[in-house]
C-alpha cells in the first residue's frame, strides 16, 4: 500500500509558475513509476507526465511539453511537477499516482494502469 499526498496547488495568473509536490509513504517509492494526471470540470482525467524509477526517462502530454517538468527524489520519497508558462486551460485538479510494471516513454499512460492515487490539488490559472 502506498499513500500519496499532493501539495503546491493554488491560484496563479497566466504565464506564471507553480511547483506541485507528491509525498509518498507506506512502501518503497523507488519501486514505482510515477505519473501526474489532471481533471478539469466535466472532463475525463488525462495524462500529464510520467517518470521511470530512476528519473532517467520521462514522457509528457503534447499539451504541456516544453512547459512542465516532472522529477523525483527517491531519497525523499517525493515527486514533483514544475509548471511554467501556465495557461487558463491548465486549470484542473492535479493528481499524482504510482504504478508498478514495465516502463517505456509514451506507453501505459492511461489512468487505469495506475495502482495508487493521491487526493488531488487544485490548480487555477486566471487570464
Image: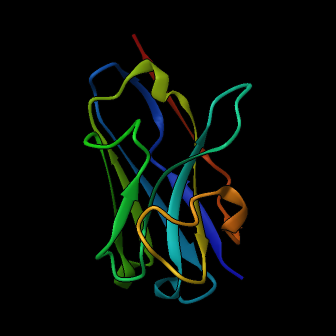
Q: Going by the image, does 121 lie left or right of 74?
A: right
What x and y, as percent, mark residue 6? 54, 55
Q: Going by the image, does 17 lie left or right of 76?
A: left
What x and y, as percent, mark residue 126? 43, 15
What x and y, as percent, mark residue 26? 63, 84
- Which residue lies most toward the top here? 127
| Image quadrant assignment for residue 51 | bottom left
| Image quadrant assignment for residue 52 | bottom left
- 64 is higher (above) or lower (below) than 97: above
Query: Which residue is located at x 64 percent, y 59 percent?
Result: 118
Residues 7 and 73: in front is 73
**Disc count in the image?**
0
Query: Which residue is located at x 39 percent, y 41 percent?
Result: 62
Which quarter of the image is occupied by the N terminus?
A: bottom right
Query: Which residue is located at x 45 percent, y 78 percent?
Result: 77
Residues 111 and 79: in front is 111
Q: Going by the image, does 69 lie left or right of 95?
A: left
Query: Which residue is located at x 62 percent, y 48 percent?
Result: 120
Residues 25 and 96: in front is 96
- 50 is higher (above) or lower (below) than 72: above
Residues 4 and 45: in front is 45
Amino acid at each position: 500500500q502506498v499513500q500519496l499526498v499532493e501539495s503546491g496547488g493554488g491560484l496563479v495568473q497566466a504565464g506564471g509558475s507553480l511547483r506541485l509536490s507528491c509525498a509518498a509513504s507506506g512502501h518503497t517509492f523507488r519501486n514505482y513509476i510515477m505519473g501526474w494526471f489532471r481533471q478539469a470540470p466535466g472532463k475525463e482525467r488525462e495524462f500529464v507526465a510520467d517518470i521511470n524509477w530512476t528519473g532517467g526517462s520521462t514522457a509528457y502530454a503534447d499539451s504541456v511539453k516544453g512547459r512542465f517538468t516532472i522529477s523525483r527524489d527517491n531519497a525523499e520519497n517525493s515527486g514533483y511537477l514544475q509548471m511554467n508558462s501556465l495557461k487558463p486551460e491548465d486549470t484542473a485538479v492535479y493528481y499524482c499516482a504510482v504504478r508498478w510494471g514495465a516502463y517505456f516513454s509514451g506507453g501505459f499512460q492511461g489512468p487505469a494502469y495506475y495502482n495508487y492515487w493521491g487526493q488531488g490539488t487544485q490548480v487555477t490559472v486566471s487570464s
